[in-house]
């Protein structure tokens, strides 16, 4: 969720819960991450932003791993789980209230939480108010999803890439990928089959990149990948693995003969903050790959 939006919404929540710390957290099966936290004085606590911990070290495990319903703990020192958590003492949490935040499809995004230093801080009325605010966060999540996610492949879209490129950390290269001979799939089988092939191609590309790399469908049969420093695999190997994954269709339900041409742009101080320049350089390299017989990559020589 966009940071400015989170800040504004948390400040709105703060008006109902003065002298309390508020935070929005994102949950996975294994981790809990603080998206943004405001202190008792409603100022942002930057040291907690993007703080990630083991899910079972957090209060929010009780919601995520439980019934995914609102929860009030008015004495954390007596609760069988929170009394033994290190964060209870470290963060001086006497009382906790959290509610789940859901995507429209019912999947849990994370939690919206309020904590106080004093015991007995929260009532059922407080819980009702916080739950209403969680619905507002859910609406914003859905609007952002519609604006930034490609509805066919469920990848990020061009808008997301343009809006967030500057903020992607530790990026070292961008790859621009175009499916060779994809038009023949649409011409032979129609766009319904073409859409299925695009979804399959997106899945195969995703399997070849790192967890911190960003994959986006930026139009038609064209994809962009932002490779980060966390991906230790050589760029040549990444490109070759993608090309190989997109060239083997012998077991696919229909006869498909496509491959991929990839243009690679190394990111430096001149282009790392400008998506338009980076994509233009990658696009030039990609067309060099097409002119050199397709099913290859250019940009590293």
Image (tube, rainbow, N blue to C red):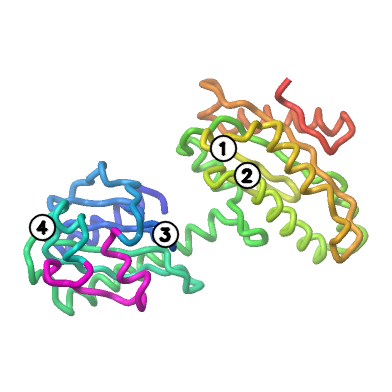
Q: Residue at x 33, y 64 (%)?
A: 111
Q: Which secondary structure lies at badge 1?
A: loop
Which residue position is annotated with label 3? Answer: 30
First reached walking from the N terminus: tag 3 or tag 4: 4
**In terms of depth relative to the viewer, which is nearer, 56 or 41?**
56
Give the foreground label among 3 and 2. 3
Q: Which residues are magenta?
A: 57-81
Which label is found at residue 231?
Answer: 1
Which residue position is annotated with label 4? Answer: 19
Q: Which secondary structure lies at badge 4?
A: loop
Q: Is residue 158 left or right of residue 95?
A: right
Provide residue 160's location: percent of width, then percent of height.
54, 47
CA separation in Å, label 2 and label 4: 44 Å
Q: Residue at x 59, y 38 (%)?
A: 226
Which residue position is annotated with label 2? Answer: 209
First reached walking from the N terminus: tag 3 or tag 2: 3
Give the foreground label among 4 and 1. 1
Q: Is residue 59 left or right of residue 173?
A: left
First reached walking from the N terminus: tag 1 or tag 3: 3
CA separation in Å, label 1 and label 2: 8 Å
CA separation in Å, label 4 and label 1: 42 Å
Q: Is residue 53 left or right of residue 167?
A: left
First reached walking from the N terminus: tag 4 or tag 1: 4
Q: Which secondary structure lies at badge 3?
A: loop
First reached walking from the N terminus: tag 2 or tag 4: 4
In the rendered image, the quadrant that contains the C terminus is top right
């Amino acid at each position: 969720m966009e940071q400015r939006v989170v800040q504004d919404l948390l400040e709105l929540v703060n008006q109902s819960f003065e002298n309390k710390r508020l935070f929005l957290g994102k949950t996975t099966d294994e981790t809990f991450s603080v998206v943004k936290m405001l202190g008792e004085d409603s100022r942002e606590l930057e040291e907690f932003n993007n703080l990630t911990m083991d899910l079972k070290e957090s209060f929010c495990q009780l919601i995520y791993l439980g019934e995914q319903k609102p929860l009030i703990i008015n004495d954390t020192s007596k609760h069988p789980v929170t009394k033994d958590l290190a964060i209870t003492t470290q963060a001086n949490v006497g009382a906790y209230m959290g509610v789940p935040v859901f995507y429209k499809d019912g999947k849990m995004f994370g939690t919206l939480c309020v904590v106080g230093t004093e015991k007995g801080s929260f009532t059922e009325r407080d819980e009702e108010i916080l739950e209403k605010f969680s619905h507002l966060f859910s609406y914003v999540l859905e609007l952002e999803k519609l604006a930034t996610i490609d509805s066919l492949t469920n990848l990020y879209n061009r808008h997301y890439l343009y809006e967030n490129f500057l903020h992607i950390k530790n990026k070292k290269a961008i790859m621009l990928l175009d499916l060779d001979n994809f038009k023949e799939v649409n011409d032979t089988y129609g766009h319904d089959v073409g859409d299925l092939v695009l979804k399959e191609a997106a899945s195969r590309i995703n399997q070849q990149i790192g967890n911190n790399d960003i994959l986006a469908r930026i139009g038609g049969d064209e994809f962009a990948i932002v490779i980060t420093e966390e991906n230790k695999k050589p760029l040549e190997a990444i490109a070759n693995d993608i090309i190989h994954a997109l060239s083997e269709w012998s077991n696919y339900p229909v006869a498909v003969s496509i491959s991929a041409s990839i243009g690679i742009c190394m990111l430096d101080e001149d282009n790392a903050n400008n998506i338009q320049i980076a994509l233009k350089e990658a696009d030039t390299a990609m067309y060099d790959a097409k002119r050199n017989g397709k099913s290859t990559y250019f940009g590293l020589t």
